[in-house]
Image (cartoon, helix red, strand yellow):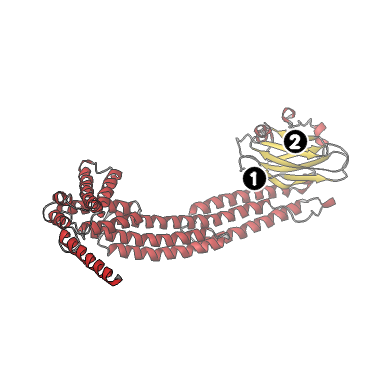
Amino acid sequence: MKKIKSLFAAIAAVSMMMISCVSTGGDGQDPAITKGVNAWNNREPAAATAYWTDIKDAETQKKYLSYVTAYEAGVAALDSTDSIKSTNESKLLSATRKALNNFATLDPALKLPEDVKEKGAVLTAARINKLVESNSLADARSMQKTAVAVYGEHPNLKASGKEVNVASSIASKQSTINTKLDEASAVSDLDGRIEAYNKLVKDYEALAAEVDKEVKNSGVSSTSGVTAAAKRFKNLGQDVSIKRQAAIREKAYIYKERINEAFARQPSKAGSGKNGAYTSYDIRDHYNSVQNDIDVIYNELLKFRTQYPSEIGQDVINDINAQRTDLKNKIAQVNREIANQEEIASRGRTVMPLMIGLFNPEQGTSGANKRSRPAKFSASSQKSEDYWWGMVDIPRGQMNDLVITCNGGRTIRVFNQNTKSGKNIKKNNLQDLVSQANRVGNSWPVMNAGSKLNGSNYYFEVGSGNGSYSGTVVVYSSFVVRKR
């Protein structure tokens, strides 16, 4: 009984399949679909609508009718570009995308009219060119691939494909150089960084030759997209060159700073005079050794320059030579001043460094126009008055201030000539140059010192007191501004 029922069920199923084949044309597809596709391809896309409205399955009918809607939206997007200005790239790109996206949804069996394909291919190739030009390479490649699938192997699209490939290859090489540039810039040791930059320049030059050859053989070398990609790579080479040059010049200016430090170097041991005081010979020997140090550093700079003659321009050498000459003149001035040993001995103790000025500022300050490196003085177990002298460099016409700060509760008086250990103060009625109105705490200022001193020497008296004292002498560009 069960076998008979199964037989009847099988016969019924076969009968239903035969009926279905008859209703759909015999191949399982609704004849209305085939007729619509033929009307689309042989007449025009709109002609398919009359047939596809007869598709019996509602979902299938909706799908095929949507192709007509998508096609018409794509054509409308293409036509809209006729009224868009050629300079309005964002609107042109938007319309091109809209057309391409609508056409890409069509069934592969549906062919686009030749005029639509032509217009779409030309318009899309132009947009791809602009995307390459703006370095939007992933977007450009995706659009080019979709455009070929939609519009076919149009010559303009083939050219845009070459653009994308060449620009992508250049971008890959650019990424390689960028990575190496970041690595070189991260080297903390300056000499190591310069060496890394030197190697990177060679790596860049090798890739630049490859880029030139690739662009020349691409067949699209004159397009704006490829031209822009090649320019980006060339600009990267300039960045590499600039960073390398900056590192080399930084090294050159380190020599300049070393010369500064050599000039400001203080004696490593006490003087040969009484209680460790510096005699004129000690001072002369010290500054001669400073001059030797400066010459050694300068010769190192000249040797370094032979490796990078184009990077270390004459301006750097001129700048350092001017400083070196200035320092030599100052040392010569010191030597002249210490030549008269008896006269110098009568001045009292000598501050160190002997010469100060804004030409050689204190490290850590905001610059040469603020404050000089300090000269230092001190004494222990000194009860009576004590006398000191030093030299100051204040350019003519500059309203710089000389300020002496002293710990130990001592009074400071400053004079513009030798006091002969105090003997000339009363004898010659020497005037105290300290501006009492501008005193601050234990700081004793001589305002506009350049106009008040006779030459470059200054002399000061440390008043009597108990125990030891210490202090500094500093040149300020403006002590009043600092005080405020």
Q: Position of residue 328 (x, y in %)?
A: 62, 51
Residue pushed farthest left?
43
Does any portion of residue 370 appear in the rendered image? yes
The secondary structure type at the circle numbered 1 is loop
| Mark 2, residue position | 443
| Mark 1, residue position | 361
Residue type for callout 2 = Ser
Q: Earlier in the sequence, mark 1 or mark 2?
A: 1
Q: CA distance from mark 1 to mark 2?
A: 19 Å
Residue 94 is labelled as: none
Between 219 and 324, which is closer to the camera in this rendering? 219
Residue pushed farthest front?
1
Residue pushed farthest bottom?
3
Residue 226 placement, left or right of 174: left
Q: Position of residue 240 (x, y in %)?
A: 45, 57
User: Quadrant of residue 373 in the image?
Assistant: top right
Q: Residues within 10 Å of mark 1 (few under 14, many from 20)?
A: many
Q: Position of residue 294 (x, y in %)?
A: 63, 56
Q: Is residue 477 above or below residue 317?
A: above
Quarter containing the C terminus = top right
Q: Position of residue 121 (x, y in %)?
A: 21, 54
Q: Is residue 131 above or below residue 206?
A: above
Residue 84 placement, left or right of 441: left
Quarter containing the N terminus = bottom left
